[in-house]
Amino acid sequence: MPIITDPPWFQSLPSWLSKRHLKRIHRLHDDRLALIIEALDYLKNLPTSQDFPYHLNLPDVPNDAVEYRGWVPDLLCELVSVCVYMGTANTQGNYTLDVINEDTGNSCLSGGVPFGMNTVAADTVTTVPLNASSGALDFPARGRWTVLLTSDDINFDGSDIYVELVFRG
């Protein structure tokens, strides 16, 4: 601890404020400063962002559409990843996936068009390309999204369908 010397203004202090009081104030100041530095070091090591994954198990519905709606946590988020999985790949008709940012009305998928789920290999996790357009992947606090899976064939034969959305906030 540094040595406290009497500054020139010390002579003009009230008589009840002694040198002992000043030393105590100085010690309290050092203790509080140490706590502040410790807190700042702790905060410096916290992650700057956090991922929020949503895993969805969706039913297979031949010749129909399945919609699943959700929302992000109460903070600004960005959709950073979409992955899909099918235990059995569909071989009948067209089967597509779309992820829609309900606050903008835009698709979050590459080119703003649905992803062809018929390209997914059986029993394999596949990453879906995302839309590179500015703002397409940005969600406000409690921003809403919709996952839409559409089949156009009554003989749809895919099964065990999972979608994972990962948001970073």
Image: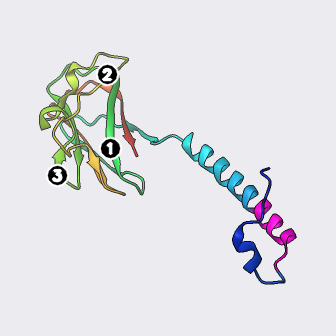
**Residue 132 spot, x, y in % from top left:** 18, 35
Q: Which mark is residue 151?
A: none
The quadrant holding residue 117 is: top left
The quadrant holding residue 111 is: top left
The quadrant holding residue 121 is: top left
Q: Which residue is mark 1?
A: 78
Q: Amino acid at mark 2?
A: Thr
Looking at the image, is mark 1 or mark 3 earlier in the sequence?
1
- Circle 1 sits in a helix, a strand or a loop, which is it? strand
Is the magenta region chiefly helix, strand or loop?
helix
- Closest to the camera, between mark 1 and mark 2, is 1
Q: Amino acid at mark 1?
A: Glu
Q: Which residues are magenta?
A: 17-28
**Residue 2 spot, x, y in % from top left:** 77, 51
Q: Which mark is residue 105?
A: 3
Q: Which residue is mark 2?
A: 126
- Circle 2 sits in a helix, a strand or a loop, which is it? strand
- Circle 3 sits in a helix, a strand or a loop, which is it? loop
Q: Are marks 1 and 2 in contact (CB under 8 Å)?
A: no
Q: Amino acid at mark 3?
A: Gly
